[in-house]
Amino acid sequence: MNGSGNPAKKGMDLRLQYILSLLTGPLLLAIGGTSAVLFTVRYMGDRLALPVLSFDLLLLSGTVLPFLLGIVSTFLLYPRSEQKRTRIYLVTAIAVPALQVLFALFLLILSFLPPVLRILCGGEEMLSWLSGALRISALQTLLYTAVFTAAAALVGFLWKKKTLLFVLIVFFAAFVLSMLLMYVFAFSLNFGLTGFVIGYGLLQPAAVVLPNVGRWKAPVKEP
């Protein structure tokens, strides 16, 4: 990327890396959520599938606004001036964690709304669990967002080496760790459904923060 060539081609290649990173995180999050639902049905019974699915979809919904922000910045607000690109990186690096904080507050507020939770649970039986799950997830979102923001900023801003390969490696590491935590807490440590929440909460902040915080490698020079 640092060699000679058409600057426009370099820019498109970098945009492609970014778009792929935007897509991979939510995809892994959806796979993890589907896995949690299937294991719940297999080992805990069909009646628990709806609240777990609702919880999964709520976490997945937290990726929507950052994803749209990334797409807009890629196709509409992506100048070739390095100075302007740096401004966009900074705006995105501030906006995405801010959206994550708002998402955590949304989960927290939602946990205190029994009428909505009854709909998500399909009744009263799992109301208490879903309320607690959303509160745990809200705290996890804040914690993991801070951790991933610091890591992505360190790599992207200080080392200036954030590439698609780096993002994918961290994505898959977070995915594997999340799945391990999910099943260890759920089964080995007998946390039941709460174990799924503890493990699954790692993936959403990773999917949102890693592509959007920190500068990408290979600046695009003006022609």
Image: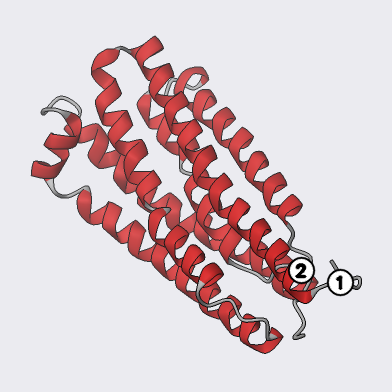
Residue 196 appearing in the image = yes
State left or right for residue 160 relative to residue 87: right
The crowd level at tag 2 (other Cα within 10 Å; few <14, some 14-19, many 20+) is many
| Residue 5, numbered circle | 1
* Residue 38 found in image quarter: top left
N-term-proximal mark, 2 vs 1 = 1
Kindly identify the amino acid type of the residue bearing the numbered disc 2: Lys
Give me the residue at 77% from left, 82% from top: 221
Q: Quadrant of the N terminus?
A: bottom right
- Residue at 49 percent of width and 63 percent of height: 71
Q: Residue lying farthest left? A: 115
Q: What x and y, as percent, mark residue 205?
A: 50, 53
Q: Considering the image in quadrants, where does the C terminus appear? A: bottom right
Dot label at residue 10: 2
Q: CA distance from mark 2 to mark 1?
A: 8 Å
- Secondary structure found at label 2: helix
Residue furthest toward the right?
Answer: 3
Q: Is any part of residue 148 visible from this angle?
A: no
What colouring does the structure picture have?
A: secondary structure
Side (left or right) of 11 relative to 47: right
Q: Percent x, y for residue 162?
A: 73, 63
Element assignment for label 1? loop
Left or right: 120, with 207 as reference point: left
Residue 200's spot in the image, x, y percent? 47, 37
Q: Residue at x 38, y 53 (%)?
A: 62
In the rendered image, residue 3, in percent from the top left (x then y), is placed at: 91, 70
Q: Are marks 2 and 1 in contact (CB under 8 Å)?
A: yes
